[in-house]
Amino acid sequence: MFNRRTFGKTVGLGTGAAAVSLSGLPTNVSAATTPARTHGTTVPAVPAVTPATHTGLGALKHVRAGLLEMAYAEAGPAHGPVVICLHGWPYDIHSFVDVAPLLADRGYRVLVPYLRGHGDTRFLSRHTPRTAEQSAVALDIVAFMDALKIDKAVLAGFDWGSRTADIIAALWPERVKALVSTGGYLITDRKAQLEPAAPGVEHNWWYQWYFAGDRGKKAMENVTERIALCRYVWTLVSPNWAFDDTTYQRTAEAFTNPDYAAVVLFNYRWRIGLVEGERRYDRYERQLSAQPSIGVPTLTLDAALDPFTPPGDGSAYRHHFTGRYDHRTLADVGHNVPQEAPSAFAQAIVDADRL
């Protein structure tokens, strides 16, 4: 999930963000969408759909990309403008089960890949270390774009997906037409992570410390226990989301990937300095340690009921975005924004594409 240091100056997280914009105007946005105005032109609203209207993303496709054979879903016309939707932890491609058809209906080619260690995505070699540095995950997506001969795309994500999209926008901006980043700027500053955060922030990161020890490692390496743990996380970070057993089990299938535990444990342990990454990623991590700015057109989303959302309506990270920019806070929505509020998420993509 998110970088705890991004919110290190906040206290008492868990009550959501105040929906006040930088200009002082209210920006509370519900899951229902309204027409947006970009470059003086009114953009028709994405139709409002009830979450869980759709139950699947169709047959998976596969492509060899870098170190992986990546599994992904695709919707929309083959020659439409490309949108790549990136999931987080503990989630999978079904976070976009309602978003993808909304965008496909508007003429977008929508690609939703399983990240390394998730679902049907597999490492090509058994000798490849099952690491998950932030730059490694980002390079997976760059390789995915290369394999599909996609020069540039709109990138949209949440949690690990936001971080991945942010990194690509910062280091390879020529590949990003526009960015939708839930939670704002999520590039991890490992040095800052070594310092203690406010108690409320540390409390929200309980699972990070759990994964740091042997008990958490054993839980993650046991499929039954990891599936129960991930479901519990869902209930904590999306308190208003009334998902059912079928919805959860559909996603939990992605957690049975043989590399799932290794990838997730590495990612969280690496962030707090308990393990070192591979040398092949060192140069990228040095660049990311400087917290590079993002200059591509960007729309950031905050979910008011997400315990990781900082107060201030995006003011804590606004300075990282130097290009055309918009921000929205979504009322009554938790961490899994695209699945809880698919119309609002799809609208953000359409509007970011027109910034």
Image (cartoon, rainbow, N blue to C red):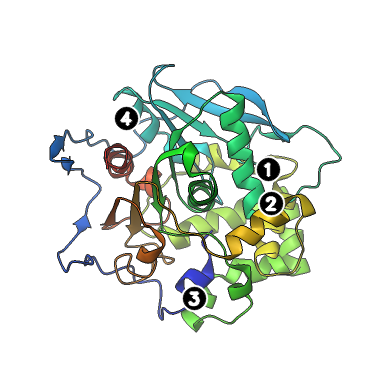
Q: Is residue 35 left or right of residue 316?
A: left
The quadrant where residue 115 appears = top right
Single out the residue that lies furthest toward the right. 127
Disc 4 crowd, CA 10 A, few/some/many (<14, 14-19, 20+): many
> Residue under circle 1?
117
Q: Which quadrant: the N terminus?
A: bottom right
Labelled pair 3, 1 in contact (Cβ < 8 Å): no
* Residue appearing at x 52%, y 53% in the figure: 163
Q: Amino acid at mark 1?
A: Gly
> Residue under circle 2?
132
Label count reads 4
**Of the residues under marks 3 and 1, which one precedes in the sequence?**
1
The Cα atoms of the two marked residues, 3 and 1, are separated by 27 Å
The Cα atoms of the two marked residues, 1 and 4, are separated by 27 Å
* Residue appearing at x 27%, y 38% in the figure: 354
Residue 143: x, y in percent? 63, 34
**Of the residues under marks 1 and 4, which one precedes in the sequence?**
4
Q: Nearer the viewer, mark 4 or mark 2?
A: 2
The Cα atoms of the two marked residues, 4 and 2, are separated by 31 Å
Disc 2 crowd, CA 10 A, few/some/many (<14, 14-19, 20+): many
Mark 3 residue element: helix
Q: Amino acid at mark 4?
A: Leu
**Of the residues under marks 2 and 1, which one precedes in the sequence?**
1
> Residue under circle 3?
201
Disc 3 crowd, CA 10 A, few/some/many (<14, 14-19, 20+): many
What's the mark number on residue 18? Answer: none
Can you see residue 222? no
